[in-house]
Image (cartoon, rainbow, N blue to C red):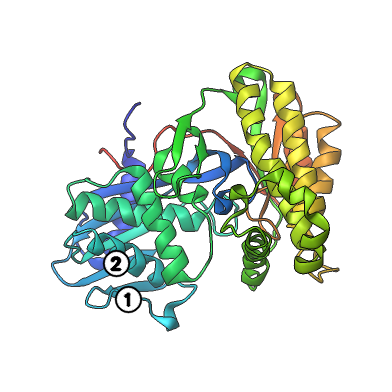
Amino acid sequence: MADLVLTADERNILDAGFAAAFGGAPERYFSAPGRTEIGGNHTDHQRGRVLAAAVNLDTRAAVRLNHTGVIRVLSQGYPLCAVDLSCLTPVDAEKNTTPALIRGVAARFAALGCKVQGFDAYVTSTVLPGSGLSSSAAFEVLIGTIINHLFFAAKVSAPEIAAIGQYAENVFFGKPCGLMDQTASAVGNLVTIDFADKEKPAIRKVDFDFSAVGYALCIIDSGADHADLTDDFAAIPGELRAVSACFGKEVLTQVDEDEFYASIAAVREKCGDRAVLRAIHVFADNARVVKQVAALERGDFDAFLELVTESGRSSWMYLQNVIPAGNTAHQEVAFALALCRRALQGQGAYRVHGGGFAGTVQAFVPLTILDSFRAQIDTALGEGACYVLSIRPQGGVELNI
């Protein structure tokens, strides 16, 4: 795997931003990629399987030790974050903020025996917030990679950095996310991950080149805002937890599917219809990941596309993460899905991407109609709404110069 090299222009941008923010020059440079979920929608927090990839959009940092007990991070376009390392416990006032993520990552490293010290970082990102490519996971992995290299001799593995990022998001930030986003960002490449062992997820690279079969991997920004959707996101693992509890289990992948269907009337009575429908989705989408990986590895791309379509239908019908509860006038993700269906002309595949409710749609688009597809999407949703992505082999890394 080739190392990532910072170009002169990229370095100049980071250096100028760092000098304006902190004075002087940075000492080192780091990068963490965004991610795209290709299979397994909301299966990760149930300790299920996913198919995911790091992508060629990333979050970068120019970094210098500041010889204090404070981490200072200035992200381009945002206020300065200053986190005092004398406090490494959750701060209620920081919930849902960037300082919470920084403090959480630092706290976990400290718990592992790392002597975390202060540093200054100027951060730029092409992983736009709300893009569905998980800017928060890329940021967590970036901070973890910086601390790992600066203060811990890079002793922590990429999957462990992912777990540290999830810890920060769950405990300090206050979002009950799974581990897929952080793992895909930290590890890199196209990978299938089985989270059955939450301490040591099984990660395997999948060798496949979408462009070689004449397709582009696209992400469509619906324009919807993630603000005030935490309750919608949290309801999914909450309802699945209630279903699992009916069988004395913690997560759905510990429940026997046949036993679930044999008891479905009682579960429906206790947990409600939406919870049961969401469980139906997770059972099916978890199994679908295995079929998707097998289809790619045997070169059956048509079968893979059909499985992507099935996953999208299941997310909309059963998981119900396309339209936020009660929304009528604003149904941006549903609108983006409708646009994709028309623009694809019966070819390729499309689905809700990631957490859902807001954010993005994923599409596999034949290269022969890519220009037309992008034009239709951008006309309806705004210039640049359609991102054409490639898979990045590297996860969170220090950049060469």
Q: Position of residue 60 (x, y in %)?
A: 37, 50
Q: Is residue 308 left or right of residue 269?
A: left
Q: Are marks 1 and 2 in contact (CB under 8 Å)?
A: yes
Residue at 72%, 31% (x, y): give it. 365
Ranked by sequence position, the earlier of labels 1 and 2 is 1
Which part of the image, by quadrant, shows the N terminus?
top left
- Front one among 292 and 76: 292
Residue at 75%, 66% (x, y): give it. 271
Residue type (three-letter) at the residue carrying disc 1 = Thr
Q: Position of residue 155 (x, y in %)?
A: 22, 45
Could you say whether the residue bearing mark 2 is in a helix, strand or loop? helix
Q: Position of residue 187 (x, y in %)?
A: 40, 40
Residue 106: name its quadrant. Answer: bottom left
Q: Which mark is residue 107?
A: 2
Instruction: Look at the picture and state if 381 lies above or below 110.
Output: above
Q: Which residue in the structure is indicated by mark 1?
A: 89
Question: Dot 1, crowdedness within 10 Å: few (<14), some or many (≥20)?
Answer: some
Question: Dot 2, crowdedness within 10 Å: few (<14), some or many (≥20)?
Answer: many
Instruction: Look at the picture and state if 103 lies above or below 29.
Output: below
